[in-house]
Amino acid sequence: MTPFELSVCAELNRETAKDKEESDLFLAYINAYWQRVETLKPFNELMGKESTPKQMTAEEMLMNVMGYHSSVGGVTDPILEERG
């Protein structure tokens, strides 16, 4: 291992340790906060997620799949392309 590689590994280790420390502090803070709250909001609301996922029609799903398929270089069926 060269001195440069060693310094990169050391920096990565410092950043990882700092991230873990911040994560642990955040978790401790949230746990302390939740112990003092009378009523909790639903978890999905706290995380900013929708409670019910958006329902797609069959046509929307087909168009999404075809768009993804063509973006990765796939060849689509000409009959299906006429629908979109």
Image (cartoon, rainbow, N blue to C red):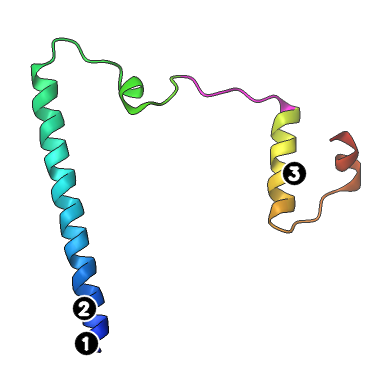
Q: On screen, 84 above or below 43?
A: below
Spot occupied by residue 76 in the image (x, y as percentages of width and height):
82, 50
Q: Is residue 61 left or right of residue 14?
A: right
Q: Which mark is residue 75?
A: none
Numbered range of the magenta stretch: 52-58
Q: Earlier in the sequence, mark 2 or mark 3?
A: 2
Q: Residue at x 14, y 44 (%)?
A: 24
Are the two marked residues, 2 and 3, in contact with CB atoms closer than 8 angstroms?
no
Residue under numbered circle 2: 7
Is label 2 in contact with label 1 (beta carbons under 8 Å)?
A: yes
Q: Which residue, as the protein is rendered here, is positioned at the far top?
A: 38
Query: Which secondary structure class fits the magenta region best?
Result: loop
- The answer for how far apart the CA atoms under marks 1 and 3 are is 49 Å
Q: Name the image quarter holding residue 3.
A: bottom left
- Residue 56 position, x and y percent, is 65, 25
Residue 54's spot in the image, x, y percent? 56, 23
Type of the residue with mark 1: Pro
Secondary structure under tag 3 reads: helix
Residue highlighted by disc 3: 66
Q: Alpha carbon of mark 2 to alpha carbon of mark 3: how far?
A: 46 Å
Q: Is residue 54 magenta?
A: yes
Q: Residue at x 16, y 37 (%)?
A: 27
Q: Is residue 7 magenta?
A: no
Sooner in the amino-acid sequence: mark 1 or mark 3: 1
> Crowding near pointer 3: few (<14 within 10 Å), some, many (20+)?
some
Looking at the image, the residue that sits furthest to the bottom is: 2
SS class, disc 1: helix
Count neighbours of disc 1 (C-alpha within 10 A) and say few if under 14, some if 14 to 19, many if 20 or more.
few
Label 2 or label 3, whichever lies nearer to me, is 2
Labels 1, 3: front one: 1
